[in-house]
Image: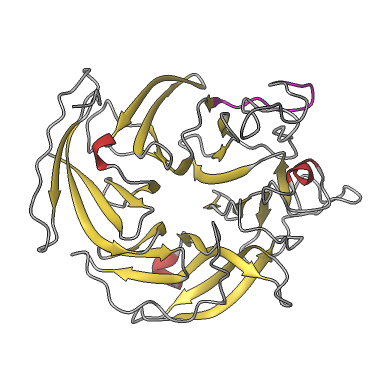
Amino acid sequence: MNKSSLKLVLAARLATVMPLILSVMPASAQAATIQMEILNKNLDHPWAIAFIGKGQMLVTERPGRLRLIQPNGSMGAPVAGLPKVDAKGQGGLLDLITDSHFVENKTLYFCYAEPAANGDGNSTALASARLSDDGKKLEQVKVLFSQKPKVASNLHFGCRLVESSDGTLFMTLGERFIRKEDAQKLDNHLGKVIRINKDGAIPADNPFVHTKGALPEIWSYGHRNMQGAVLGPDGRLWTHEHGPQGGDEVNKPEAGKNYGWPVITFGENYGGGKIGDGITAKAGTEQPLHQWTPSIAPSGLAFLRSDRYGKAWQGSMFVGSLKFRYLDRLEWRDGKVVREEKLLEDLQQRVRDVREGPDGLLYLLTDENPGYLIRLRPE
């Protein structure tokens, strides 16, 4: 039995799965008692979940399929109308969010690995579309942004999306692994957070709009591979990113600032050896708010706003761990993590995404084949 502070009741809702009860003794007063419902266990490397009302959800599958999930967990044929997706390595159909006015306009935004027209390389792209009234296809698909340059790599696509309070869109972009030095240059989109309007236009107040030689979409730079992004309770963008061998980071990217990669890092080269200057801080670069060494390989990011699990969890940050296969809960106070709690360690699946649903409950996706869609309920 592990030392998780969670008392877990695991109950599979699918008729083909016998209910499994797993109890873990709470290790602290912070413990919550929850029931884990497996809503669907037939997904192929699911990557992101979005809520569209009436209990329905959209889930992306990395191989290039979009699924409409009913409240009971059932799903039919994939939603039609996606652009061509380059599903190789870490690439494929990735993040997905709905527009803040989705009820009225049925608009959603998704990002994916976009192949080069000549087949030479790929990059991360962002598109908008309207979900048809019957939920069976995408209409009015429009590519709003394509990362430059295209790179012959199947790694580090980044690809998390956030709609900000002013209606602009943030998108995280990886540095494609083999081009890490480009994260420090402003003439490309590698290792950047970008910010655009919903029609693909550039906001006039972006930090590098008037900087010669800089791409105007860039919001912040010096990032590695960001696979978590969310609008925090403070109304600001929060992200996390993979370090190399150690040094996964939580940041709040601000306009025009440099987050250091690969000049500074708390990690090291795979197999050992320094990266960049071999230091963890340098003038002109920003420090992470929190870092994990050893790396947990974070993916998915949510702040719990509801009190459905009790006051102890309200306001906590939740992060999936791909490497160690658990859900991480972090309590913040005055900009610092004051408590960290490993949850669902007995699940033993790579947690790819975590989101708070409109019902105030947490939903998870596991990056497996078959992968799970899970809802956590208070007992």
Give the total of numbered labels: 0
> On screen, 11 above or below 151?
above
Q: Is residue 51 visible?
A: yes
Chief SS of the magenta region: loop
Q: At 25% across and 65% down in the image, what residue appears?
A: 54
Residue at horizontal 55%, vertical 60%? 91
Please provide percent x and percent y for residue 360: 28, 45
User: Residue, x 50% and y 43% (percent of image)?
Assistant: 231
Q: Is residue 289 magenta?
A: yes
How far across and how far down the image is residue 34, in percent?
17, 38
The reply, left or right, for residue 187 in relation to residue 81 is: right
Q: Quadrant of residue 243?
A: top right
Please tell me which residue lies in front, 337 or 274.
274
Residue 242 appears left or right of 355: right
Residue reaching furthest to the right: 212
Image location (x, y in percent) of residue 265? 66, 28
Instruction: State the image quarter where residue 347 is shown.
Output: top left
Percent across and percent down for residue 216 are 79, 54
The quadrant of the rendering that contains the N terminus is: top left
Residue at 72%, 21% (x, y): give it: 279
Q: Which residues are magenta?
A: 281-290
